[in-house]
Amino acid sequence: MELSIPASPSRLAGLRRAARASLREVQDEVADDVVLALHEVATNAVLHGSSGGQPIQVVVHINNDWVEASVLDHGPPPPARRLRPRPTPMSCGLAGGVCGCWGGWSMRSALNASGSAPG
């Protein structure tokens, strides 16, 4: 699924429906986590990241046992700050890991046949 939505809170329900539909071949528990994470990040992009009404791009790809999701807004860059090491994917707290990046967000979830994170 690749989607561009206006930066409006009224469009978030449609985003959740589209994401859920694109994840129908994934276990319900994983799909729930991805949809929730997309909703939270897209809400932040709408409220804080999108400048001048620029649209928000949302991508969800399923490739074998991987789910990759990203949200990109066109807001201003964050203020400069001291960089800290990024956590490893498994220490981020969600199954499969979460990695944040400047200017966008992405989540990767690697699942084995039982639906749990490898490792």
Image (cartoon, grey):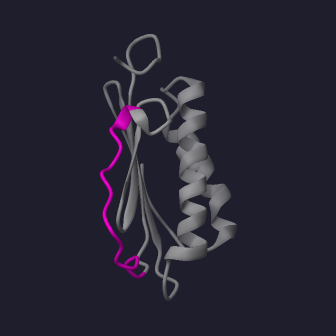
In the picture provided, is 82 more to the left or to the right than 44? left
Q: Position of residue 68 (x, y in %)?
A: 37, 42
- From what the image shows, is residue 51 above or below residue 67? below
Considering every residue shown, the one lying at the far bottom of the view is 52
Image quadrant assignment for residue 28: top right
Q: Which residues are magenta?
A: 76-90
**114 sits left or right of 12 in the view:** left
Tell me if residue 91 comes above or below residue 59 in the rendering.
above
Does residue 82 show up magenta in the picture?
yes
Q: Position of residue 96 (x, y in %)?
A: 41, 31
Q: Residue furthest top?
A: 114
Residue 2 percent coordinates (x, y): 40, 55
Residue 68 shown in magenta? no
In the rendered image, residue 27, in percent from the top left (x then y), is placed at: 53, 23
Task: Kindly indicate the quadrant of the structure image that contains residue 73.
Answer: bottom left
Kindly identify the residue that appears in the image at 56 percent across and 75 percent down: 48
Residue 51 can be seen, yes or no = yes
Q: Residue at x 61, y 63 (%)?
A: 43
Residue toward you, 86 or 31: 86
Tell which of 45 and 9 is nearer to you.
45
Nearest to the observer: residue 108 or residue 89 = 89
**Is residue 7 visible to us here?**
no
- Quadrant for the C terminus in the image: top left
Q: Is residue 74 left or right of residue 37?
A: left
- For the stretch drawn in magenta, the main secondary structure is loop
Indicate the quadrant where residue 20 lies. Answer: top right
Q: At 69% from the left edge and 68% from the top edge, which residue is drawn?
A: 10
